[in-house]
Image (cartoon, rainbow, N blue to C red):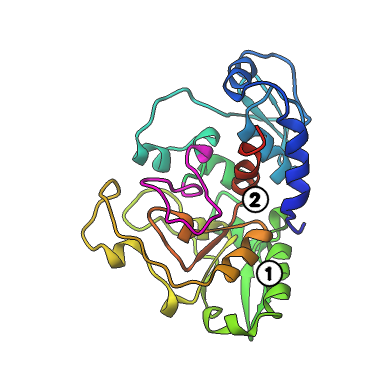
Amino acid sequence: MVFLVVLFCSLFVQCCAEGEQNASNKKARNDSTIVTNASDTQIPLGTKALIIAYPHFVKGYKNNNLLLADGSQMQYDDGREKSFAEKLDDADPEDMFAFTYKRTGEEPEYLQDAGRSRCEALFKMMYGESETVVRQKLVQVEWFGEKVLFTPVNGAADSLRAVVKELKDHPELKPYLKSSGTFNWRKVRGANRQSAHSYGMTIDIGVSQSDYWLWKNPGKKETDKIVYTNRMPTELVNIFERHGFIWGGRWYHYDTMHFEFRPEILIYDTSKHQV
């Protein structure tokens, strides 16, 4: 499944045409009707994004629960008011859409880290609950003279292949393409949450050309003000985003080597502009 932003844009123009979103969200949480169509205007935008992005796993919505393909349900919004850190460390599916992902040349706004929140229960359900399970699913993807391991789940490996195909038409970007890692079952440094690399749908590239917020702001804490830095070309980022990958350089806590397959974040970002 190669991610096409244009397709999802058209879907969301249709589904977001009616009503104010806050009212829709309230009604959705009290609605006992099973919703399986992402064009339904009575469910939260985040739920719509998940149904479209992950159709093999998220089948519908009812009473504030995602309806999953195996017949189980997962609470969408636990109703808790959370701090910035809690939205990262203890995210429910709704928290994944708490931040703004801006596909512009502007520097990210304070604490806007769309994509850093991941509901671990959801991601483990889709990609695998352990290193062994995730690893068994991985496939090799040709990446500019080397082979990298990536998950085929949700079409992530095919999307990375589509990125490769497009990048081949841009030889000027070759200095930024050396891989420094894909799959790595581990915790986020300094935290107790699973790294996105654990799921095999993330690639780091061009470390020598990259910047990371703690490298440039040593000793700073998550809620401190920091200085933004980036050396990655816009066209490289645009190519990845066209195929469903978000970029860590869009985060306030930037990680410019980091590209993560998160189509739901891009779909949600597109949908908000249609409401």
Q: Which mark is residue 208?
A: none
Q: Could you tell me residue 18's position as x and y percent?
A: 72, 23
- The image quadrant that residue 264 belongs to is top right
Q: CA distance from mark 1 to mark 2?
A: 14 Å
Q: Residue at x 47, y 68 (%)?
A: 257
What amino acid is labelled 2 in the image?
Pro
Quarter of the image with the N terminus in it: bottom right
Q: Could you tell me residue 229's position as x and y percent?
A: 37, 66
Secondary structure of the residue carrying numbered label 1: helix
Q: Which residue is mark 2?
A: 263
Q: Is residue 4 magenta?
A: no
Q: Which residue is mark 1?
A: 163
Quarter of the image with the C terminus in it: top right
What amino acid is labelled 1 in the image?
Val
Q: Residue at x 53, y 80 (%)?
A: 178
Span highlighted in magenta in the image: 96-116
